[in-house]
Amino acid sequence: MYENSGADILDALQTQRTSFQQDGLPSLSVRERRLMRLLKLVEDNEAAIVDAISADFQGRSAHETKLAELFVVRAGIRHALSHLGQWMRPRRVHTGLHFLPASNRLMPQPLGVVGIVSPWNYPLQLALCPALAALAAGNRVLMKPSELTPNFSHLLAKLVNDYFAPSELFVINGGADTASHFVAQKWDHLVFTGSTKVGRLVAKAAAANLTPVTLELGGKSPAIVDATCDLDVAAPRIAYGKFMNAGQTCIAPDYLLVPKGSAKRVADAIQSATSGMFPSLKYNADYTSIISDRHRDRLNGMIDDARSKGAAVIHVNPAGETFGSETRKIPPTLVLNPTMDMTLMQEEIFGPILPIVEYEELNDAISYINAQDHPLALYWFGKSSESRQRVLEGTTAGGVTINDCLWHLVQEDQPFGGVGASGMGAYHGQWGFDRFSHLKPIFHQPRFNGTFLLRPPYGPTFQHVLGLLKKLT
């Protein structure tokens, strides 16, 4: 794959910055045309995108790519097109009684040039969703996709070059050195999606330039099975949320908390549901491979570590297939009653391994979650509104889905983002538009107003007016 140099990054950044200086407030029609071209890029090249991503994974479910990537991007673009005119309008905001007849408003303005560093697990969605929000807000955009998806990253660079001028949208390709050069530039806003560990390095590099950042990270997202849960309903939803994309999803359930004594029953239900979705694995196009040999070996190491420390390991392998070095697939794996000294309970798993942890009381489950960094997502399954509310009020997470997994991510009328170690900032829908805009406060003072009474020389009139203002505020 062609790798851009540090000089290429500087040239592309300067091209976009010069273009923005010449037209810093694109009209509604200009922004709509850019979004329409982005939509056309996706729709005209669906088959090529699906094939490129599958080649990078050595087997990625085409249906998962169409749903979790192409559909999500299309929905985001169409939502933005439907609401963009409204988002761009100046917003009237309240003016205090003591300042009348003046008025306040907020004027959305583009920030400038936005840099986006996107990961490998959903390479289209996590590059283009922030890009569409930044374009809707009137910015120029440079993207740095992952080197772990070279086929897709090369295709994305080609397609962007076909549909956009470099002054509007451009792709920078390369490895770790290129990424380091990229994040060290003076952006008007920088978006990074990836691990918490790398996110800290990105934030540090951005801080040197006082670059504002949106960090979409990860962490260990819990799913709680309440005592009132209907397992027949919950098990297939948990299995789908965990094993979609072979668990390589930043908001996948990382571990399952279940009532004391129910781990085996829950595991049996999830095993049955998973077997129904994936009756075979090794040559099943519906079941996705692990992105690289290194990641496969890391996941197998987690399983071996858990087994060596006494955990019960259940491989969901309905067809009894063997998985050697010739494949990057790992069967869905359940780990019963793991302990905190196991690697899979200390690190984000990011693969098809689901630890199942028992809790005595609901408060114990809440305490277990709160003893760790705030997760990107949290899931709760049950019928008790009281228990549900205790969990919602007693925990902090980037987002929550009740009685299912993943679906809060694709709500264009809700923000998506992390909190604490799972990230900062949010986008999607209007939250994305606002994230990549400066909402400039404007105070409009009419000709006739009373502020002259507060000017020097200060005396009894000033004291009287200030006393009235105190009563009004």
Image: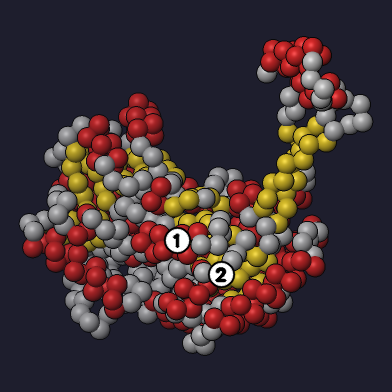
The residue under the point 70% across, 69% down is 17
The local crowd at label 1, few if under 14, some if 14 to 19, many if 20 or more residues have their Cα within 10 Å, is some
The residue under the point 77% across, 40% down is 442
- Against 184, residue 378 (above or below) is above
The residue under the point 45% across, 68% down is 119
Q: Identity of the amino acid at label 1?
A: Lys
Corner quadrant of residue 162: bottom right
Viewport quadrant of the C terminus = top right
Compare residues 388 and 349 and report the one nearer the observer. Answer: 349
- Does residue 87 appear left or right of residue 363 in this picture? right
Q: CA distance from mark 1 to mark 2?
A: 12 Å
Q: Look at the image and tell me whether residue 458 can be seen.
A: yes
- Does residue 35 appear left or right of residue 202 in this picture? right
Q: Identity of the amino acid at label 2?
A: Gln
The residue under the point 92% across, 31% down is 447
Residue 333 pos. (x, y %): 22, 61
Q: Residue furthest right?
A: 447
Sequence-first tag of 1 and 2: 2
Contact between marks 1 and 2 (CB within 8 A): the answer is no
Corner quadrant of residue 138: bottom right
Q: Secondary structure at mark 1?
A: helix
| Residue designated by label 1 | 204
Compare residues 433 and 234 and report the one nearer the observer. Answer: 433
Q: Residue furthest bottom?
A: 2
- Against 456, residue 397 (above or below) is below
Residue 47 pos. (x, y %): 55, 77
Q: Secondary structure at mark 2?
A: loop
Q: Look at the image and tell me whether residue 54 can be seen.
A: no
| Residue designated by label 2 | 185
